[in-house]
Image (cartoon, rainbow, N blue to C red):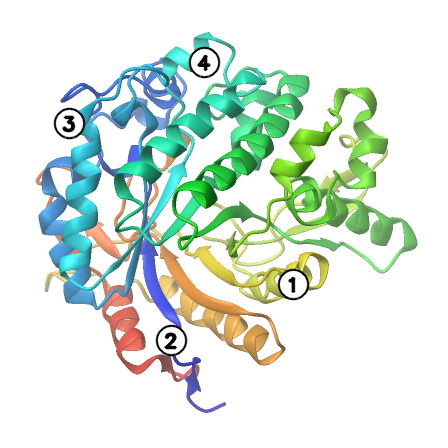
Amino acid sequence: MGFQKFPDGFLWGAATAAYQIEGAWDEDGKGPSIWDDFSHTPGKIRNGDTGDVACDHYHRCPEDIALMKELGLQAYRFSISWPRVMPEGIGKVNEAGVDFYSRLVDGLLEEGIEPTPTLYHWDLPSALERRGGWPNPDCAAWFANYAELMFSRLGDRVKRWITLNEPVVVASGYMGTEMAPGRGAPADGLLAGHSLLVGHGLAVQRLRALHPENEIGITLDFWPSYPATDSAEDAAAGHRMTEALGWFPDPIFLGDYPAVMREAHGNALPQFGEAETEAVTQPLDFLGLNNYSRHVVKHDPKAGPYQAAILPPQGPVTAMNWEIYPHSLRDLLLWVNERAHPKVIYVTENGAAFDDRVDADGRVRDEGRRQYVRDCLSGVHEAIAGGVPVRGYFVWSLLDNFEWAQGYAMRFGIVRVDYETMARLPKESARWYSETIRANGFDPDQ
């Protein structure tokens, strides 16, 4: 196939999230989040794990920046913990929390690494959940005020911002019971999704007013749906599931929810007011996309609002029992580009969990992860050749970390973390990724 070189200026990075790595859950004035509450609830997290300590990044930040420099990362995507900087979600600012992120940004810039913060990666302040959380329409304004705070404190140095990470998962935390806050209320999930969209739009407006020279976008996650058979019914089920992927991109880029959602949810799905539409449809500088696998679906009248049953994985799986299907990233990039026509796309998360082991010689030979990332990047290369404006890639994740409901049982990192000593150990995938960054490409046959 030959060496696959990426365009000049292609941005290579890695991603993390605050609750998954920081620890220091109640130190230096930080308030609790819904994930603190959820993980402290017996039976919610595998093995009773919590993010109380996680990777102890809060105390080991300089060490982790040095590690990023050693690997040659050009950008680092992290998230800001809302309750670390505003313990109650509104009102008083915790200067110690703001200072932590200011030092992180300065440390990255000193090493030539572009900071790419995400304002919200699922850790809503508990105080705001008590006020109704994201289903409360006021949460959009609360989020915008928090965003404005961070823009005002870091916007002179941070040039690229992400408002929300995977709002569909945030909404699912209200719909279901497996993610925080775990309400199990589908109608609340639809309301939460609406507030998330409005909050995103308001935050974009605040950045434009404060720092119009900065870039801003949102990160959305998708698992493309493929019909199980060539039957007309399965094809229609796949189409409905694909259309439903428009839950968040369609209001932003097309002005309203997809018709299939209106038909499925009726009056439970909110309408956008004039001011909301103006906010939500604010032009973006880029769209961030996360992808890990695909869904294979078949028609089933009893299966949810879209009458589509998701089948078990159709091939080899990762430790998360997610099908290893690298083509899904390429297909997603092509679909999003055709549907939304974003100016620029960054792959803001892509990776795989495997049951890594440290060999007797002290190395972690995670060949499965290396092959998965390599094959996904081949798909990115193919999408770029097809005209999709992909400008960068962030592997998930820099570090093994707290994997939400799975606790510490799943390892996604290209760097292994020993949770007893907190020692960091780059895996073979990290070495390969570092070489790829230096060469701005790779040989897909190796």
Would residue 327 be visible to someone looking at this image? yes
Residue toward you, 380 or 150: 150
Q: Tags 3 and 1 in contact by the CB under 8 Å rule?
A: no
User: Residue at image x 28%, y 72%?
Assistant: 432
Residue 21 position in % (x across, y down): 25, 38
Residue type at mark 1: give it: Asn
Sequence-wise, the earlier of marks 4 and 3 is 3
Q: Which mark is residue 129?
A: 4
Residue hosting label 2: 9
**What is the C-alpha distance between the residues marked 4 and 3?**
23 Å
**What is the C-alpha distance between the residues marked 3 and 2?**
35 Å
Residue hosting label 3: 96
Sequence-wise, the earlier of marks 3 and 2 is 2
Sequence-wise, the earlier of marks 3 and 1 is 3
Q: Is residue 89 left or right of residue 29?
A: right
**What is the C-alpha distance between the residues marked 1 and 2?**
20 Å
